[in-house]
């Protein structure tokens, strides 16, 4: 297995001892914070003063590119100085189909929408996707190959990513938390086609944890 980017690796903050319900809760925000915190470890302490100015969605762009047209000069300067090296997204990044923006979205993966929490300290965004059970094995292999996502494990009550995982296109790139899972009776991979669908999430944060 190889990753075409700069992944922070699957060995961080494992959640193998918790059930899928906790994984879904983590995917909603906690995984994003943990992923970026691990990616930020080698970097200097991030500034907590970065502001956010929503902008209209931008056209699809390569890996780490994001719109910064609406942010003030001071805000962007603080992001460049304190947050960019830690994988924090630019402050006015639009909530969008992140895999499509990266140019790495398979045709069989359905985009469900993007949600953001501007009231949270880290201001996370999460793009949500769905894949049919019949295509889940193929998507798992794709995410492992393209991003270095760890193989799914069955924990408690469903299949889930075993640990928070963040992928970056390279130093200075945005850190994307990538997860996949579903609550289901224990069915081996050979029978995943009996599961209606799996959930996939790709998240970022816009402020340092």
Image: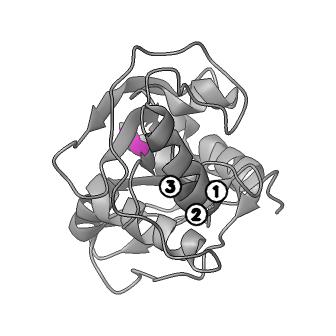
Residue 27 at x, y = what percent?
33, 57
Look at mark 1 in the image and give the residue it sits on: 167
The N terminus: image quadrant:
bottom right
Q: Name which of mark 3 and mark 2 comes first in the sequence.
A: 2
Tell me, yes or no, whether the two marked residues, 3 and 2, touch with CB atoms within 8 Å: no
Q: Residue at x 82, y 51 (%)?
A: 4
Residue displayed at 37% across by 36% down: 128
Residue 207, image x, y percentages: 38, 54
Q: Residues within 10 Å of mark 3 (few under 14, many from 20)?
A: many
Q: Where is mark 3, residue-wise?
A: 177
Q: Residue furthest front?
A: 74
Q: Is residue 198 magenta?
A: yes
Marks 1 and 2, how far apart at CA: 12 Å
- For label 1, count other residues whose C-alpha is less than 10 Å away and answer few (under 14), some (14-19) or many (20+): many
- Please give the label number shown on residue 86: 2
154 lies above or below 198: below
Magenta region includes residue 145: no
């Amino acid at each position: 297995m190889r990753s075409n980017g700069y992944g922070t690796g699957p060995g961080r903050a494992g959640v193998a001892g918790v059930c899928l319900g906790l994984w879904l809760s983590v995917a909603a925000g906690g995984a994003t914070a943990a992923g970026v915190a691990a990616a930020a470890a080698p970097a200097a302490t991030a500034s907590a003063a970065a502001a956010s100015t929503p902008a209209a969605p931008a056209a699809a762009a390569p890996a780490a590119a994001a719109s910064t047209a609406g942010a003030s000069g001071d805000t962007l300067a603080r992001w460049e100085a304190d947050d960019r090296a830690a994988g924090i997204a630019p402050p006015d990044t639009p909530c969008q189909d992140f895999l499509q923006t990266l140019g790495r979205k398979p045709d069989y993966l359905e985009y469900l929408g993007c949600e953001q929490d501007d009231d949270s300290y880290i201001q996370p965004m999460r793009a949500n996707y769905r894949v049919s059970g019949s295509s889940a094995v193929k998507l798992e292999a794709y995410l492992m190959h393209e991003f270095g996502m760890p193989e799914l494990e069955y924990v408690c009550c469903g299949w889930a990513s075993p640990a928070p995982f963040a992928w970056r296109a390279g130093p200075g790139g945005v850190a994307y938390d990538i997860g996949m899972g579903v609550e289901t009776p224990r069915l081996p991979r050979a029978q995943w086609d009996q599961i209606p669908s799996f959930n996939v999430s790709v998240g970022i944060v816009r402020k340092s944890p």
